[in-house]
Image (tube, rainbow, N blue to C red):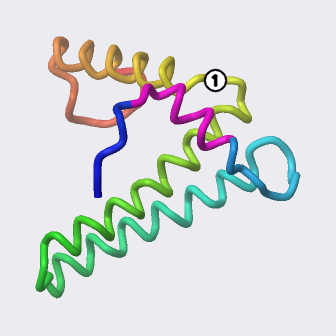
Amino acid sequence: MDKMQEISFNEYQRAALSTAVYPDLGKAVYPTLGLAGEAGEVAEKIKKYHRDGVSSFEAFQATMRKELGDVLWYVAVIADELGMDLIDIAEANIAKLAARKTAGTLQGSGDDR
């Protein structure tokens, strides 16, 4: 399969939104529940990978690519429901992690470290 041309976070978000069809349960309720389900599927696949191993790492990667893509779709839709762009979220996250690295607080717990 040919790789898609690289796209920005916001281009991805717009493309994801073009396929967003779900019931109106209140802003981000439906996509948040979907995200929880998909994150569970990612965790389940990783668990089974460590428990059972895989006969083909390439097949495992293909499965994980699909599952992680579903997670990314839900994140993009939730962000839109909350009036946010993925690029802003990504940039803020990297800045937060870089500050934690500089402060030596990457490990540990708490949002405000």
x%, y% of residue 79?
62, 33
74 or 4, which lies in front? 4
Q: Which residue is most to the front?
A: 2
x%, y% of residue 67?
41, 63
**Amino acid at dot 1:** Met
The answer to whether residue 14 is magenta is yes
Quarter of the image for the N terminus: give it. bottom left
Residue at (71, 50) in percent of width and height: 20
Viewed as shown, does residue 27 lie left or right of 70? right
Residue at (20, 34) in percent of width and height: 107
Viewed as shown, does residue 3 lie left or right of 111? left
Q: Magenta stretch: dominant SS?
A: helix
Residue at (38, 65) in percent of width and height: 42
**What segment carries the magenta color?**
7-17
x%, y% of residue 5?
35, 35
| Callout 1: SS | loop
Q: Quadrant of residue 52?
A: bottom left
The answer to whether residue 54 is magenta is no
Q: Quadrant of residue 25?
A: bottom right
x%, y% of residue 57?
13, 72
Residue at (74, 56) in percent of width and height: 30
Residue, disc 1? 84
Is 59 above or below relative to 22? below
